[in-house]
Image (cartoon, rainbow, N blue to C red):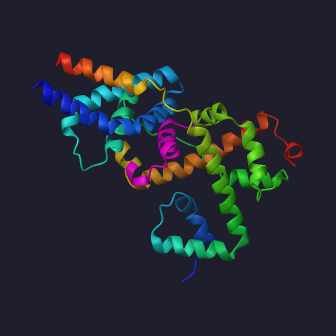
Amino acid sequence: MMTEELSVQHRFERELQPIVDVAFRYAFRLTGNRDEAMDLVQDASLLAFKYFASYSPETNFRAWFLRILTNRFFRNRERASKLATESLDAAPDLYLYDRFKADGIPVDREESVASVFEKINEEAVQAALAKLPEEYRVVATLHLVSEMPYEEIAAVLEIPVGTVRSRLHRARKQLQVHLWELAQAYGITPKETQ
Amino acid sequence: MKYTCNETFERLQDYLDRELSEDETRLVDEHLSGCGVCAEEYEFEAMVLRHVQCRVREPLAPADLFSKIQASLAAESSAA
């Protein structure tokens, strides 16, 4: 019995180890805190191990595990509904592109975009993400931390692929608005970037 | 068949995410190679996305996270 149990644990660990980094980054972006992210990944690991028998080896372990982690996150936050509908103001298309052009910042040079992002550090991007309604933030985070295909995000969140697509596109547009606000708050002007 | 600027623009986000079918991808490729305006918009969006991804993909998991999980699992297994 003990040998069999160890072997299950070994199989579980073999599946989990390659995705620990992605799971941690995702948890970190959800919680905004390293310690909470570690706790969340550990909690999700114990829960996933408990239900490992229900996982089919030929399916996607990453999607299965991140679904458990996401549900755990929402349960920890005592949300009645894990993905309640929240509104997101419609942001215009190509928002940053238009702002760059309007302010005379070259849009066709990597260095001009880089000069703006040099000042928008990891914490600032986190702050911009945090401004998104949660259901949009979750989709955007899954996509950004792992370049997860829409279908896999849909499997993690148990929502239709079309919903993933629309939430991701809207989140990305809104993120550009927040990033531009941050760029302005950080004093990035056309003069500095030319 | 060729895509117009509007048809290309409608597919830009899915193109960035490599979510288009093979045929659609080819049609967007063809349009971008012949349309400087759309190509500039696409290149800009791709640059922004790369920078955001780069920021979001920090930090790495703490080095001891996996060993802590292993210890918890071992404790759970022996308690069962």
Residue A44 belongs to the span the image colors magenta: no
Horizontal and vertical percent for residue A99? 77, 50
Q: Is residue B75 visible?
A: yes
Residue A134 belongs to the span the image colors magenta: yes
Residue drawn where x is 37% and y is 52% of the image: A160
In which quarter of the view is residue B54 placed? top right
Please give left or right for residue A84 compared with residue A140 in the image.
Answer: left
The quadrant in which the N terminus of chain A is found is top left
Q: Main secondary structure of the magenta part?
A: helix
Horizontal and vertical percent for residue B56? 57, 39
Q: Residue placed farthest to the right in the image?
A: A191
Q: Residue placed farthest to the front in the image?
A: A3
Horizontal and vertical percent for residue A170? 56, 49
Residue drawn where x is 57% and y is 65% of the image: B10
Q: Residue placed farthest to the left in the image?
A: A1
Please give left or right for residue A77 compared with residue A179 in the image.
Answer: left
Q: Is residue A93 visible?
A: no
Horizontal and vertical percent for residue B77? 21, 22
Q: Which residues are magenta?
A: A132-152
In which quarter of the view is residue A79 placed? top left
Using the image, determine if residue B33 lies above or below residue A176.
Answer: below
Q: Count the marks.
A: 0
Q: Nearer the viewer, residue A103 or B60?
A: B60
In which quarter of the view is residue A118 placed? top right
